[in-house]
Image: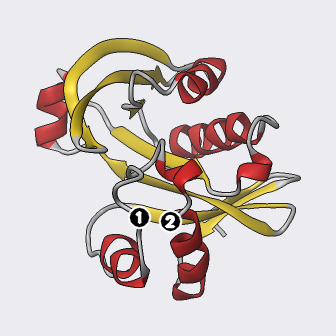
Amino acid sequence: MIIQNELLAIRELTRKDKDNMVRWLSDPRVLEYYEGRDNPHDEHLVESHFLNRQDETIRCIVEYEGKAIGYIQFYPVLAEEREIYGYGSQEKIFGTDQFIGEPDYWNKGIGTDLVGLIKHYLFDSLGADRIVMDPQAENKRAIACYEKCGYRKVKLLEKHEQHEGEMRDCWLMECIKP
């Protein structure tokens, strides 16, 4: 277990999570915001994109009251991204990506709790100076969630992410250690 509170737990992704990841990442409702509806994931893609990666990203499952409901990953922001975002090399900066894969758990405040939980973990346990995200500009629900958690929009990243056959604008959002 990486971190938990009364209702949420974040634990590292394991092979036993493959079926949930395939189900979530082949659901058009989830793919509309994460990966794209034109990019459903089968077992092979989940294996190569999430389970068999060797990099600095920590990939995790989100559990709510003991039930796996989503995914979150966090990683140190490396030089190439720092340059795109306009950051120097002195700060300890982490990025996160996340989704709730069970639509029945949407719009219940769980995403806000999740983002707040990981934010405190990255600041308090890993010593982050800044945490960044780059949601698509059209993803109003995610942006509102991040703003509730203390993130602010700092830069529009034009044509930043390939999604459903086109380059989409994203917002660079950040939260600075208090």
Instruction: Identify the secondary structure beneath mark 1.
Output: loop
The amino acid at mark 2 is Ser
Under mark 1, the amino acid is Pro
Graded by Cα atoms within 10 Å as few (under 14), some (14 to 19) or many (20 or more), the crowding at tag 2 reads many
- Please tell me whether mark 2 sits on a helix, a strand or a loop: loop
Outermost residue to the bottom: 16
* Position in image of residue 41 (x %, y %): 41, 70
| Up/down of 23 relative to 167, above or below | below
| Left-right relation of 170 to 150 | left
Q: Residue at x 36, y 21 (%)?
A: 171
| 1 and 2 marks in contact (CB < 8 Å) | yes
- Identify the residue under disc 1: 40
Give the number of the disc on residue 70: none
- Closest to the observer: 173 or 137? 137
Residue 105 versus residue 92 in the image, above or below: below
Q: Find residue 162 and report its image quarter.
A: top left
Q: Position of residue 142 (x, y in %)?
A: 56, 30
Indicate left or right for 112 with 73 as reference: right
Please give the label number shown on residue 26.
Answer: 2
